[in-house]
Amino acid sequence: MKFSGLGRGLESLIPKSALSNQNKNVEEKGDRPREKESVFLLEIDKIKENPLQPRRDFDEIELRSLADSIREHGILQPLIVTKVEEESPSGIKVSYELIAGERRLRAAKMAGLNFATAIIRPKTEAREKLELALVENIQRSDLNAIEKARSYERLSKEFGLTQKQVGEKVGQSRELVANTMRLLQLPVEIQKAVETGKISEGHGRAILSVDGDNQRLALFNEILTKNLSVRAVETLGRQIKGVSKRVNESVADPEVKVWESRLEDFFGTRVKLAKSGGRGRILIEFYSPEEFGAILDKILKS
């Protein structure tokens, strides 16, 4: 099975074809040295879920549909697990921790299977577990935007990856990773709405066009009340920003407003004064070559 656009991702771990014969060796793909891996039949009760699984919610209807398919045809693509050995009073206790295949594992349990086919990988670092769980879900479009954003943030913060490096890991552009991570700047209530499908990812991005939680929550409530489209929200967001800008200008430093007024009277055109401490700049507008010449004359004669 070809996993296009995902770099090495799962393709470096999942064999070229899923095999139902547990004793048949398959070749590992990727640009690492080629090696043989076996597909084993493991007790499902001994397989633990991946603690770094980025997906939080699993659609019950989809799981039941997959369970029906597994009940009839079995697990066509092996799980990927790593062996965990723990000391106990009776000796070494062996279990397995899932790396990839959470939906298949849950559906297999739902189908009442006692065993599942799996490939046992060597001990896997936490970052690789997160990467693989993330890539697998993205490949199947199973993660919602907020889950992706949280996963990208974990890869970035916990493992020190840049947004570009995160993109390379999951087969996405740096810009897409950055825009997705920005959704985490939304108030929690709005994040939850995106996560549950109450509003779309596009709505979330449009809400980010306004500043501050209060304005964002107000815009969110407008979406819910009026069932606004993404385009309508983008338009409303621009209007809100325009009002905010005018309000900010109206409460500017009174002394600055006085000087702007005096300069406008002197030059006969609009003047904007940006002042910070003892420094700043003066912007003088003109709308024709004649006005530009008149402004220069007044400056040179002053």
Image (tube, grey):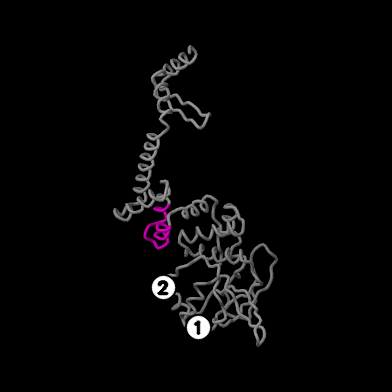
Q: Is residue 250 magenta?
A: no
Q: Image quadrant for the N terminus?
A: bottom right
Which residue appears farthest toward the top when viewing the image?
301
Which residue appears farthest toward the left when viewing the image?
226
Provide the residue designation for mark 1.
Answer: 113
The three-letter code of the residue at mark 1 reads Leu
Who's the residue at 41% across and 18% down the image?
A: 266
Describe the element under mark 1 as helix, strand or loop.
Answer: loop
Indicate which disc residue 60 carries. Answer: 2
* Residue 269 percent coordinates (x, y): 39, 22
Who's the residue at 40% across and 34% down the image?
A: 249
Q: Which residues are magenta?
A: 188-204
Image height check: is 231 above or below 2?
Answer: above
Magenta-drawn stretch, dominant element (helix, strand or loop): helix
CB within 8 Å, label 1 to label 2? no
The three-letter code of the residue at mark 2 reads Glu
Q: In this image, 66 relative to 48: left or right?
A: left
Describe the element under mark 2 as helix, strand or loop.
Answer: helix
* Residue 167 percent coordinates (x, y): 56, 55
